[in-house]
Every structure is written in C-alpha cells, then in structure tokens.
Image: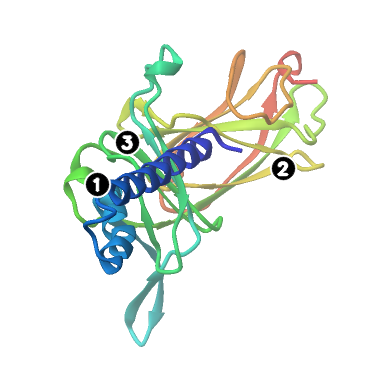
Amino acid sequence: MDHNIWCHLWYHTGMMSMVILAILAVRRVFANRLSPTLRHLLWVFVPLVICLPTINIPIVVDNANVVTVGGHFLTTPAAGRSVHIISNDLNVRSVDDIKPSTFTRTDSEGIFRSTQPPTGVTVDIQGSRTEQYFAWHGNELAQAKEYEFQMVKSSIVKGRLLDGETKEPLANQLYFYWRYHPDDPGKKAFMPQQQYTNANGEFTMPLHPKLKYEIFIVANRQSNHGGGPYTPKIEIAVIEPSDGDMDLGDLLVAPAKIAH
C-alpha cells in the first residue's frame, strides 16, 4: 500500500482514538451532572470540536475538453481523475526533507480535497489519455477557498525506437519521458513517466501541449519499479508538443546503450 495512504490511515485512526477517549473522560467526570440527552449529544459535539480543523476546502476540477452544442461550449465535471499534489522542492537530501503529498481522486462532481496545505506544489491530474492537467503553483491554492483546474486536451506523440546498428525495432523497451517547464529548465516533475514500446518498437504518449519533454532510456534497465536511479541516462529526444499531435518517426538508439 502507498506510504501516503498508510499515513492517512494512521492519522485518522489516531483522531478517532482521541475522540473516543475525550468523550469517555467527559462522561466520567460529569456522570452525575449530565442528563441522558446531554450525554448522548457528546458523541456529536466532541468529534466536531476535535476534527473541525481538519475539514478541507473542496477543490473543483472541470473538464475543458469542449463539445460544441448549438454553437455553445459545454463543459462537464472531470470525475474519477487521479490527483497527485507534490512539493515543488526537488532538493531532497534525506527522508526528513520529504514534504507530505496528496494522492487522491475526484468524485462524481469533479471535486477533491487536499489533506495538506497546497503551498509551493506541483498539481498533476490524470484521467483518460485524451486530457490532463499539470502545473506548478505557488501560494494561490492555499489562499483560495475554491480553485478550478482546467483540463487540457492531450497531444498524442508517437514514434518508433530502433537499434542504431541493426535498424531492428526495440521491442518491449522501457523508456521514460520527463516533464519540464518550457521557460524554466529548473522546474520539472518530481519523477518521469514511463512506458514500454510494443512488439514493433512503437510508442504512443499522451503529452501536455504546453510542457517540454525529455525522452530517454536508462542503460541496462528494463524494470518498471517506481523511482530511480535514472542513470546512465541515454537521451533520445527533447520535444515540445505544442497544440497538435506529433509523429517522431524512427528514432535510432546506439546499440551499446540499449538495455538488455
């Protein structure tokens, strides 16, 4: 189970334990002074007092994939989308430096709630391969009572990896693509995304049209376990998808650098 999910389970278990202990303590102290009605009301008011600071403001995600209806644009809630909120600080030197992250999903109305103050974070929202959201944020999310994220239509980028010597397709080759801010090389996603080519060495990636991407493989790595290391990194291409689909064609990889 994800580390963050365990953290949330431990947190809420602790909160419920505090609630129960507080109620039992109050009932014991005032056992002879409270009417039966008031003793029952304790089960309502004490949890509210303890848990009220943890109640979060809803954040709305709207689907910006527009459908033309009678000349007007129709937007629909982006329900069931995965949401990752991660700190912008990539200079992590130890486990103690890792700031809490939020991993959740939007509900049927396209709403999710962040369990951490969203200050200085990257927001990554994924659903279908046709639309997505990814952006770096400062303090504006923490200051807003409600914030609307607009999903954008993905640019579909495809190509094929070939052995640079034999020109044979690199079948089932693990490759990575790292997201960068197009105007600030210092801003990049916390981790790269990863996929495998098919039996013909072909790949298809749904990319954000406003970001910059570095496509690469890691020599002698075929395991898709999460995390690094991402070295030795063999760069394949650097692209900016713009607002349309792209076909990169055949991309040659030096044979000495191919993972086996």
**Residue 202, numbered circle:** 2
Mark 3 touching mark 1, by CB under 8 A?
no
Amino acid identity at mark 3: Val
**Residue 53, numbered circle:** 1
Q: Total marks drawn?
A: 3
Amino acid identity at mark 2: Glu
Instruction: State which mark lies toward you, 3 or 2.
Output: 3
Inspect this view and state whether residue 55 appears: no
Question: What percent of the width, then of the height, locates residue 59?
Answer: 31, 56
- Single out the residue that lies furthest toward the left: 143
* Figure quadrant of residue 190: top left
Q: Nearer the viewer, residue 156 or 98?
A: 98
In this rendering, position of residue 140 left or right of residue 220: left
Query: Which element is circle 2 on?
Result: strand
Query: Which element is circle 1 on?
Result: helix
Which class describes the residues within 10 Å of circle 2: few (<14), some (14-19), or many (20+)? Answer: many
Q: Earlier in the sequence, mark 3 or mark 2?
A: 3
Which class describes the residues within 10 Å of circle 1: few (<14), some (14-19), or many (20+)? Answer: few
Question: What percent of the width, then of the height, locates residue 260?
Answer: 80, 20
Q: Nearer the viewer, residue 40 or 196?
A: 40
**Residue 71, numbered circle:** none
Real-space Cα distance between discs 3 and 2?
34 Å
Q: Nearer the viewer, residue 28 or 213?
A: 28
